[in-house]
Each structure stands twice: as C-alpha cells, then as structure tokens.
Image (cartoon, rainbow, N blue to C red):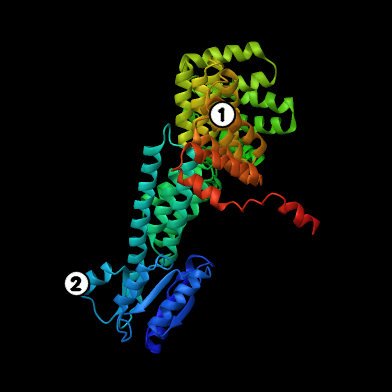
Amino acid sequence: MKIFIVSEKNYEIKQVRDFLGRLPFGDFGKGNTLDFYQEENPKTALEKLEKNAADGIGYDLIIVSQKMKALPGIRFARSVTARKTIASAPVMLVVDNLNKELVTEAMGAGVSGFFTMPFVMDEMRTALMRLATILLSRARKKISDAMEQAKATSAKTANPEILEQIHRKGTDVIERCAMYAPWSEEVHTALAAMHIEHGDFAFAIPKLKLAIKINPNNRDTHRQLLACYKKNGQAMEESATLKKLLATNPSSPDLLTKLGDSILHEGNYKEAALYFKKAIANHKPGDPARLKAKSHVGLGKAFMAEGDELSDPAKHEMAKNEFAAAATTDPTLVSAYLNLIASYKKLGLQAEAKAAAAKAAAIAPDNAEGWLDLFSHYLGEGEVQKAKFSLQRAIQYDPENQITLVRAGQMYFLNRMFGEAAGLFEKAAEVNPSDTRTFNFLGICYRRMEMFEQAVANFKKAINLDPEDYNLYFNLGRACQQANDTAKAREAYATALKLNADFEEAKEALASLSPAVPAGAEKAATAG
C-alpha cells in the first residue's frame, strides 16, 4: 500500500510511519507491504499529488495533519476532494483530539477517518478498520446500484456478461478495502459473499479462511467454508478431518464409509476402496441396513471408476456385484439401483438394466421434472456425482425436452461447470435451433473455457436470430478481444453502441482497445 503523509512536523511523520509499520499487515499476506512517501509543505504536497497523478502515479492512502499553518488538514482534504485526478485516495486526518464539530467539518471536506495523537497501537488499528468499513459500505452501494441499473435498463433478461463485469469490478474494489485493514473480518466475509453469490467458490475459500483466522469462533463462516468446499468439489480438508476422527474410532463403519466417499470424490478410487472394504468388514449384524448398503455402493463406485479408467470389464463386473449387494441389503436405497443400472449398461446387459430401472422407478421420481428437481438439490448440496446421475435419469425420460436441457444447463452454468453446461446447451440447440438464448449461453460457456472459435461461432448464430440485441454484439466483442482479434472486437463493440448509444460497458470496452492503425500506416511501418 502506497501511503502519502503530509505534516509540517517531521517527528509527526516519523511517528505515523513507525506505528503503521508495527501493525500486522504482513500477517495476512506477503503482498501487504507499506511504501511511505512524505512532504512537509502542504502546498508542495498538493502539487506533487497532481503531478504524479498526471504521470499515472497514484496513492492508496493520504494521511494529513490538521495542525499545519500553511494549510490546515481539513482545508487540504477539501482541496484533494476537489481535484478529480487525486480524489480517489481516501484521506485520514491526524488530530490532537476529536469533537463533534471537528468530525462534522472534516467529513464534509472529504475526510474518511482519523488518527488521534498521541498514537496508540490498538486505536490506530481500529481507526483503519473503521476506514475499511466506510469504504466497504460505499463499495456495496455502488455495486448494488450498478446491478439494479443493469437489470432496469436491459431490454431483455439482464446480460450475464454485464453482470459478470459488475461483479469483477466490485470484487476488485472490495479487495482494495481489505488492503487498509487486512485484519478486518468483515471485509473478508464481504469478499467471500461476493464470490459465493457469483458461484466462484474457489475464490471464496481463501477469504473465508482469512476471516476464520481473525475470528475462529464465527460458526456461520465455518459453515460457509464447508459449503464452498462441497460446492467446489474439493473434499481434501474434509477427508483430513475424517481421518483425525477415524484415529479415535478406527473400526467405525460410518466413519470408514464417509472417508471412503470423501476420498473417492477426490478421485483416488484405490484408496477409497480400501476404506469401503474396511467398513464392510467391520459391520455388525445389528448395524442399520442403509449404512451397510451405502458401504457396498461406495465400493462399487470405486470399482466402476477403476474400470472406466482401465477399460476393464472385470472391474465393472465387481462393481455390479457390490451394487447388487447394496440393493439386496436395502431394497429402498435409490442410489443402489441407479448405480446398478449404470454397471449393467457398461456390461451390455440391457435386459438387466431395464429390470433394475423398473425397481428404481418404484421408489424414485417417475418423471423428468422430479429427477430434475433431485438434480438441482444434489448440485446445490455439492454432491456432484449424485446430481449427474439424477440429470441422466431426467434426460432418459424425455431426451427431446428443451426445458429440461436448458434448465439443467443453466444450473451447471451457475455452478461454473461450463463444460457440462455447454454439452446440454448443444443438445438443446439441436432440439430447437431457433432460441437465441441457447446460442448466447453456449458462446459464454465456450468463452469462459477459452474456446474462442466456438464462442464466436455461437454468438454469431445468436446474432443471426436477433440482430437487434446489442448485448449479443458486446458478448461477441469480448470473445474476439480475448482471441486477440482486435479488429473484429472493435467492430462488434461499435455495432453494440450503434444499437444502444448509452451502453457504458461497450464504451469502456471499445476505449480499452489499442487505437486502430490508419489506412496505409501499417504497410509503411512494415516497409520501414
């Protein structure tokens, strides 16, 4: 963080530097370093700030003393606020004491916080937390207003690409808030909430961990972190916890089965199989049938994964036997039949698969909508494999139902599973090649997977269906820009602006491109 300190008293500048340098910025990341700049003449300081801003040099925080003869701190702050080039940096005022009148006047001049002399470490730490909270509140308001504006001004459904840009800019702003007080739990949970709302669970995890580091007793934060790991498909820390629990009760079939499930979810089917086998070996006659059946299902899944990887029918046969054992042990366990169906099909046993499906139908949803609801539930719970099985069943009931395909594709999209989403949107486009939204979502999915050629092709298909939708041209421009096709990107953004002259995001995107090369200039440059 770049800090500019202004005071006519050198010892005051030194004290500010010393106290700030002793605060625990570095405890929350190696990048949290402090760079100090100082000036004893307030008028010269203003000139430096303006000159540096013109040269592209900015500061993250301005600290100014109130007791300056040449230009008191509040007047200095008012001068900073009046200059748009340097007004972005928050100003904190150093005072001997605070009173209501001083605070009111200072806040009106643009001051965002106060340091009181003589300095006390905890008070300085708290003052920076208050600053971060104030900046966070402003950022949230701007994000909320931008979201409402995007939804209110859109002729159709709010453009996901616009909402993504608002989210990205918002997280950047909140990330800056954390810079001022990285020990603030509130800032990190706010960042995590932004990421969770957008489905970026992987980005939310480190923010939640920092919040827990600051306040390990916040149960809500712990629950959010656990949910993020599940939704992100990461069970490593969960398996580590289960191993610790298992050490206290190594013969527990319940813990052994849960640990096997966790490890299997991580992709290690061989290690998972060992725990499932131990669970089965440790089951007692009086144990619940459901628990016994789940252990067999888990072992069957491990064998299926190994069979798929090795293309080994023998492993698929072993998996089938475990699923059959699960169904026999607990005839009401739906997952036993669903997995048994899959194993039968792997082995080419279509009649047996049909028979198993008949049994499953008796205890499971009997229509596409019911299975799709189950898919949504499992995906929301982070049980991705169960979600995929549910979706397969939904599509099996009605492979031509576009509503099923698009709804499921959108659920995958919201969970940032873009490959799976694209697969469903492709099927939906085959069913109904006249829906603009399907091609738009396809383009967005492929762009986020950095498959730019496919993204451009699908945005063009959407534009062909609705050439008046400026959002589609903006999305096309983004794909072209990321593919380094600047000319096509410029053309797309320009078309978006022709259709909507107030399209601010398109204006910004167009301005971000390098200037167009004048006709003939490129040849001349090459010839030279």
- Looking at the rendered image, the quarter that the C terminus falls into is bottom right
Q: Residue at x 56, y 28 (%)?
A: 462
The residue to which callout 2 is attached is 100
Across and down, in percent, residue 357 comes to: 56, 15
**In front of the other: label 2 or label 1?**
1
Left or right: 493 with respect to 49? Answer: right
Across and down, in percent, residue 57 comes to: 51, 70
Across and down, in percent, residue 305 comes to: 66, 33
> Number of labelled discs?
2
Across and down, in percent, residue 498 comes to: 50, 38
Q: Residue at x 45, y 81 (%)?
A: 38
Q: Is residue 424 above or below residue 28?
A: above
Q: Identity of the amino acid at label 1?
A: Ala
Q: Is residue 26 visible?
A: no
Q: Rounded to the nearest whole Å, what is the CA distance between mark 2 and mark 1?
A: 59 Å
43 or 515, nearer to the observer: 515
Q: Is residue 129 above or below residue 75?
A: above
The residue to which callout 1 is attached is 462
| Between discs 2 and 1, the one toward the N terminus | 2
Which mark is drawn over residue 478?
none
Q: Residue at x 50, y 69 (%)?
A: 54
Q: Identity of the amino acid at label 2?
A: Lys
| Neighbour tally class for label 1: few under 14, some 14-19, many 20 plus, Cα within 10 Å | many
Q: Is residue 130 visible?
A: yes
Q: In the orientation shown, which residue stands out farthest toward the front?
A: 520
Badge 1 marks a residue whose secondary structure is helix
